[in-house]
Amino acid sequence: MAKKTFKWSNLYLLLVFALLYAPIMYLIFYSFNDGGTMTSFTGFTWDNYTAVFEDSRLMGIVLDTLLVALLSSLLAAIIGTLGAIGVYLVKQRKTRNTLLSMNNILLVSPDVIIGASFLILFTFIGFRLGFTSVLLSHVAFSIPIVVLMVLPKLQEMNPTMIKAAHDLGANNWQVLTKIVLPAITPGILAGYFMAFTYSLDDFAVTFFVTGNGFSTLAVEIYSRARQGVSLEINALSTLMFLFALILVVGYYFIQQYSINKKHKQQHGRKGKEAVTLL
Amino acid sequence: MKQTKAFYFAPYSIWLLLFVVAPLVLILYQSFFDIQGNFTFANYATYFQSGTYLTMTFNSIFYAFLITLFTLLISYPTAYLLVKTKHKQLWLLLIILPTWINLLLKAYAFIGIFSMNGTVNDFLVFTGIGRQQILFTDVSFLLVASYIEIPFMILPIYNALEEMNPSYIKASSDLGANNWETFRRVIFPLSLNGVKSGVQAVFIPSLSLFMLTRLIGGNRVITLGTAIEQHFLVTENWGMGSTIGVVLIVAMFLMMLVTGEKKKKGAFRK
């Protein structure tokens, strides 16, 4: 009896996985179609891939998207780490909880609200929409996740180490670079990675603050998809799937590198499940 | 010591002020202005008096509720079974992987799958039901939205189940409970926090999926998010858009009050 139920459960899991991957596989399958539609497969071709690489506008957008992702996650990692150390140094519980609640506002806000309110903000201070406004927005919505990734590492750190370092004559800078930073590096890396993927994945916020001249991949796909099916998008999504696969493997190794097992599963939509919100 | 604190806090507090506090204040401020830039309460009056906006809000909440329910029904058993598998970490990674594919690409795939000559319709013809208009209907919106949200529901439930002390389950069966009783009285109550954060993670974004209503729902479904996008980027009536935004923010806080648990321990120690 036990054996039978075990089999049923495996079947259920397989079905769920099939469901999760079917649309992605569907996209990949038709990226090799030479028929030009996503419904009838007429023959195998690489044409859609060469079309992607020959489309200089699209390649430019891919590079822009990567640039925004790299820069925004780097800036978010720096500001977020400093912020996490700051929050860690606050000893009053009330102030700390207030800070953390404020930190989480952007994590729980719907994208549309973030996008619309940032659009008002940029217009209000007279900031021109374009690359910089997109970059600043991405930095802004990535900072809280970095804080959430770094803070547990700080709390796990043995505070007597810092005292000992001070007693032995280290100045603040030495304490930071020799004691604190090495201890929290896995958290910073994880935060950087999450920020990077948020940036790559974002559509709604970018859509609001991008203006006319600048475009990221998600925005471009949206406008192309509204015009109908083009197999170039399929080819591009196949490439992006491979890229995501590489990133996941990379992230997996960073997680493995992280010493603490307990926080292994802290990812997912904007870290919400990790936070469980006060 | 004070100085170092200031050093750590400087960039972070600028961020807090500029990108957390200011946008919230500004969206509230903007909601009191009409399209000509005059101060007015008319946006709120319009919102609460015209049936259209209230119906739209009700529909949006109803759709979000359905999406949350569907994802929960599929995700809970999945998470429950995942915890019991051998290579948990690997399976979990495979659940996470699709979330790293851009949402728009997944939506785009469904344009093909649900189209008149698409796979689903071929299957319907094969089973004798015949071709149906699937794309650009409410059903297609619900299905695609649920599909996209499933991993975000699985993860928190998985985490909650994974953290559970297995000795409780043993204790329960030692005390004579059968499997169903153990599940109902021990496992499910203990995983409730995961369910709550999953509901939070799915319900609120489901209110604002404007790209899906446009690409898949064919503008038949109008969520709060669609209305905000429409007012900000199409009709340029920012005041009305902000008013709906304020309503959405209030809905978000209500949702968090309902599902949020009061933890006595430090907020972030998991």
Image (cartoon, coloured by chain):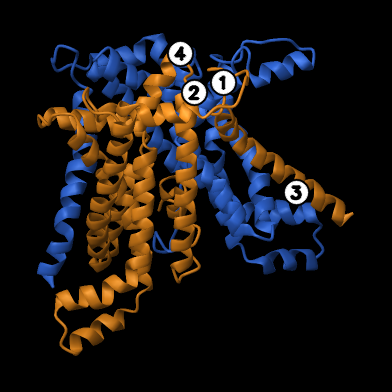
Chain colours: A orange, B blue
The subunit carrying tag 4 is B
Q: Which quadrant is home to the N terminus of chain B?
A: bottom left
**Crowd rating for badge 3 (residues with CA inside 10 Å; few <14, some 14–19, many 20+):** some
Tell me the distance, in whole angstroms, between the alpha carbons under discs 2 and 4: 24 Å
Q: Name the residue under label 3.
A: A10
Q: Are marks 4 and 3 on the same chain?
A: no
Question: For residue A200, which quarter of the picture?
Answer: top left
Q: At numbered mark 3, what does the secondary structure look like: helix, strand or loop?
A: helix
The subunit carrying tag 2 is A
Identified by mark 2, the residue type is Leu
Q: Name the residue under label 4.
A: B219
Is there CB contact under 8 Å for labels 4 and 3?
no
Q: Where is residue A116 in the image (x, y as percent from the top left)?
A: 27, 28
**In the image, residue B172 above or below residue B229:** below
Identified by mark 4, the residue type is Asn
Viewer-side residue, A1 vs B32? A1
Q: On the picture, is A260 further left or further right than B19?
A: right
Identified by mark 3, the residue type is Asn
Identified by mark 1, the residue type is Met
Is there CB contact under 8 Å for labels 1 and 2?
yes
Question: For residue A15, which quarter of the picture?
Answer: top right
Q: Residue at x 65, y 56 (%)?
A: B83
Tell me the distance, in whole angstroms, between the alpha carbons under discs 3 and 1: 31 Å
N-term mark: 3 or 2: 3
Q: Name the residue under label 1.
A: A38
Q: Name the residue under label 2.
A: A231
Q: At numbered mark 1, what does the secondary structure look like: helix, strand or loop?
A: loop
